[in-house]
Image: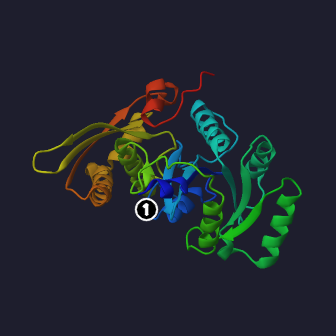
């Protein structure tokens, strides 16, 4: 590309914030066109800040998907909320997403109060409009407008794609002039070992969400590119009690086998190579107080 073309490049950061399960990860994946963040029906699925890269013409939009902001009770909760607000402070544009079915609940109100401390352009995103009537949408928009000012309001369905193209154009137009931060063919800014661990964690949540408590995590402990072109990956699933380990394993090892198959299949598609995945389950009491576990999932360890 010529120097003239380079001078026309634009690049900026867009941070998505909202209450848990507002649809931030679904929107990030929709805008980028590939999986950046895992998506489940379990609240607080996203833990670390994950970046997806959207390329439109001369503009590079770096989307930062943050953990849902809620009232923290544990150290892990505080780390997630800190990561979300830290990501929001970095954004040239901040998108505040609200699930219209849940409306302005306590978590959303808490976020609204914190928006005044952010310097970026702020836009309101009302998600899941296909599940709500027009009158409710207008009432919710007015209610939120009384508490905070936004540059623009978008009514979308992240899952179905309604209204997402208008939002994409809006973001592109607001990117400042500047060099791209990533190559034009890169879609995700996350180490592949972390992405692989997140994919396995997604499969665990989808299969065991009614049985397994929130306190579990996955780390990729080994990654070897083999001579035949395939990849050998080892991952450890950390739980807090023996009873949780038995849930993950399942009767006769059925659950862990199914989780491994589903994760291996998706990883093979992403990497476009044969993947040999080996999962191990370890009991690590109070892993939520172990700084090393936080580094493994891309979070800063809160000291108090």
Q: Residues within 10 Å of mark 1 (few under 14, many from 20)?
A: some
The relative height of residue 13 versus residue 142 in the rendered view (above or below) is above
Give the camera-side residue of 289 and 292.
292
Q: Can the viewer see residue 18 in this picture?
A: no
* x, y percent for residue 228: 10, 50
Q: Is residue 62 left or right of residue 269?
A: right
Q: Label 1: which residue?
A: 34
In the rendered view, does 265 fall on the left or right side of 76? Answer: left
Q: Residue at x 45, y 28 (%)?
A: 285
Q: Is residue 107 toward the left or the right of residue 56 in the image? A: right
Question: Where is residue 236 shown, x and y percent of the image?
Answer: 33, 38
Quadrant (top left/top right/bottom left/bottom right) for the N terminus: bottom left
Residue 124 placed where, x, y %?
73, 60
Q: Nearer the viewer, residue 180 or 169?
A: 180
Q: Residue furthest left?
A: 228
Q: Is residue 73 visible?
A: yes
Q: Answer above or below: position of 177 versus 86.
A: below
């Amino acid at each position: 590309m010529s120097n003239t073309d380079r001078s026309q490049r634009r690049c900026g950061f867009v941070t998505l914030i909202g209450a848990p399960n507002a649809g931030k990860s679904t929107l990030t994946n929709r805008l980028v066109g590939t999986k950046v963040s895992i998506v489940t029906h379990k609240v607080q699925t996203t833990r670390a800040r994950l970046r997806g890269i959207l390329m439109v013409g001369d503009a590079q939009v770096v989307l930062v998907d943050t953990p849902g902001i809620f009232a923290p009770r544990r150290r892990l909760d505080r780390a997630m909320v800190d990561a979300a607000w830290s990501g929001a402070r970095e954004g040239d544009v901040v998108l505040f997403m609200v699930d219209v079915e849940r409306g302005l609940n306590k978590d959303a109100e808490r976020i609204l109060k914190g928006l005044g401390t952010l310097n970026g352009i702020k836009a309101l995103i009302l998600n899941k409009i296909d599940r709500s009537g027009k009158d409710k949408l207008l009432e919710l928009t007015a209610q939120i407008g009384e508490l905070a000012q936004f540059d623009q309001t978008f009514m979308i369905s992240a899952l179905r794609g309604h209204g997402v193209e208008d939002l994409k154009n809006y973001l592109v137009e607001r990117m400042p002039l500047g060099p791209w931060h990533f190559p034009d063919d890169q879609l995700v800014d996350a180490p592949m070992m972390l992405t692989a661990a997140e994919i396995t964690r997604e499969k665990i949540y989808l299969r065991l969400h009614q049985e397994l408590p929130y306190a579990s995590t996955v780390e990729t402990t080994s990654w070897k590119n083999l001579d035949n072109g395939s990849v050998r990956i080892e991952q450890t699933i950390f739980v807090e009690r023996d009873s949780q380990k038995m849930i993950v394993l399942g009767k006769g090892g059925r659950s862990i086998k199914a989780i491994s198959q589903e994760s291996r299949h998706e990883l093979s598609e992403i990497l476009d190579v044969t993947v040999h995945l080996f999962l191990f389950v370890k009991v690590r009491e109070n892993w939520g107080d172990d700084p090393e576990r936080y580094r493994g999932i891309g979070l800063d360890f809160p000291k108090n």
